[in-house]
Image (cartoon, rainbow, N blue to C red):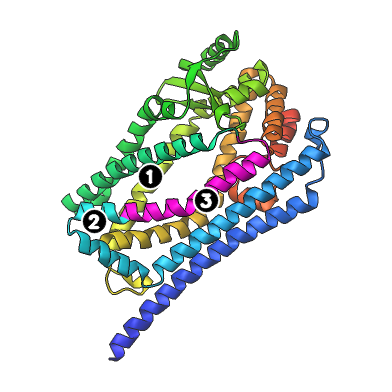
Amino acid sequence: MREYLAFALGIRYAGAMLLTLYLLTLLAGYGLTALNLAHLRRHGAEVPAPFAGAIDPGLLQKSSAYTFENNRLGLLSSILDNALLLGFLFTPLLPLFDRWVASLTDNFILGGLLFAFLLQLVKAAVALPFSYYRTFRIETRYGFNTQSLRLWLVDLLKGALIGSLLLGLLLTGALWLIAASPHSWWLWVWGFFALFSLLLMYVSPVLIEPLFFKFEPLRRAGLEEAIRELMTKAGLEISRVFQVDASRRSRHSNAYFTGIGRVKRIVLFDTLLDQMEDEELLAVLAHEVGHWKKRHIFKRLLVSLLLSLAGLYLAWRLMAWGGLPGLLGLGQASFYAQVMVLSLLASLAGFLFTPLSSWSSRRDEWQADAYATTLFGRPQALASALIKLSRENLANLHPHPLYAAFYYSHPPVVQRLKALLTPSQTPQE
C-alpha cells in the first residue's frame, strides 16, 4: 500500500511539474507580448529618423492600431488554444478519447489516422472564427483584404483537402514504419520525413502553389532582363520569373525564391510590383540571393534535419522508457496519446530555444543585407524598399528590444535602415 501511494504521488508530482512548466512558458510569452505592446504605446507616436518624410503621424498611429488589434486577437486565440489543450491533456478527456478511438479499430495505422484527424478537425473548427475575423474585420478595416467570402471559402476548402492529403500520406508512411520496425523506427521515420519534405519542395511550386495563385510572366518591360543579369552576376541560374495575382486576396506584398539546387524560380507579388521601382525590386532580390550565396537555406535545412533526427531518437527512447503516461497521471496510454505528451515536451524545449533560433535568423539577415549591398551596389535602394514594405504593410516600427531579441527572425527595420545608410554602424549579432 505504501509503495502504491508513493507511486501515485510521484505521478501526480510529475504531472503538476509538467503543467507548471508549461504555464510558466505561457506566462513568459504573454508577458513579452504585453511588454512589447506597452513599449509601442509609449513610443508609437515617434517617427524614427530613417522614416522622416516617408511616414506621417497619422499613418504611424494606424500602424500601431493594426499591431494592437492583431496582437489582441492572437493573444485571445492562443489563450483559447492552450486552455483546450491543457483541458484535454490534464483531465480524463485524453484517456476517454484514447479508449474511444481504440474501440473503433484495432488497426495501428487506422487508429493513428483517426486520432490525428479528429483532433485536427477540432483544432480547425476552433481556428476558423479567428481566421474569419482577422480577414474580414481586421484586414478589411485596415485596407488589406481584397478577397470575397466565396474566394476565402474556396481557399479554405482547397487548403483543407491538400493538408489532409499530405498529412494522411505522412502519417500512414510513418505509422507503417513504426509498426514494421519497432526497435529502430526513429531512423526510418526520420528518413521518410526528410525525403517527403524534399519532395514537397520540388512539387509545391508546380502542383500546389498554382492552385491558389495565377502565375504569369512579368509584364513590366525590361525587368526580367535586369533580374536575369543580376542573377548571372551572382552565379545563379534562373529558370523562370513570375508575377502572381496576390492582389485578388490581399494588398500585402512579398517576393520569394523557389526551387532546389542550381535552378531557381523567382516569384513577385503583383502588389509588390505596384509599390516599388525596378531598382528597389532588384535590391530586394539581391538580398534573397544573399541567402542562397551564403548557404543559409542549406544550413537551415541541415540543422532542421539534424534536430529532427535527435528529436525522433529522443522520442523513441522516451517511448521505450515507459514513463510518459505517468507524466499526465495515467497508468497507460496508446502510442498516439504518448505522442501528445511528447508534443507538449517539445513545445517546452522549443520555447527555450526560440531566442537562439531568432538570433541565428537575424544574423543571416544581416549577412544577406551586406551581400545585397556588395552585389547590387546601391544600399539606398534596399533601404527605400524596406521603408516601402514597412509603410505599406503597417509594420511595427517600435518593437521592444527584449521582445525582438526573443521572437524576431529579422532585425527590427529601423536597425536595418541605419546599417544600410550608415554602414560603419552595422550591428553585430
Which residue lies most toward the front here?
150
Q: Amino acid at mark 1?
A: Leu
**Range of magenta residues:** 116-145
Q: Most prominent secondary structure in the magenta stretch?
A: helix
Tell me: 299 left or right of 333.
right
When the figure is inspected, residue 358 is found, relative to residue 424, above or below; the finding is: below
Question: Disc 2 or disc 3, which is closer to the eye?
Answer: 3
> Which type of secondary structure does the marked residue at label 2 adopt?
helix
Q: Nearer the viewer, mark 3 or mark 1?
A: 3
Which numbered circle lies on residue 129?
3
Is 287 or 22 nearer to us in this picture? 22
Q: From this view, report whether residue 71 is shown above or below residue 53.
A: below
Residue receiving disc 1: 306
Checking the image for residue 163, the label placed there is none
**Residue 141 horizontal/vertical position (percent):** 67, 41
Where is 296 relative to 330, above or below?
A: above
Viewer can see residue 212:
yes
- In the figure, residue 148 lies in which quadrant? top right
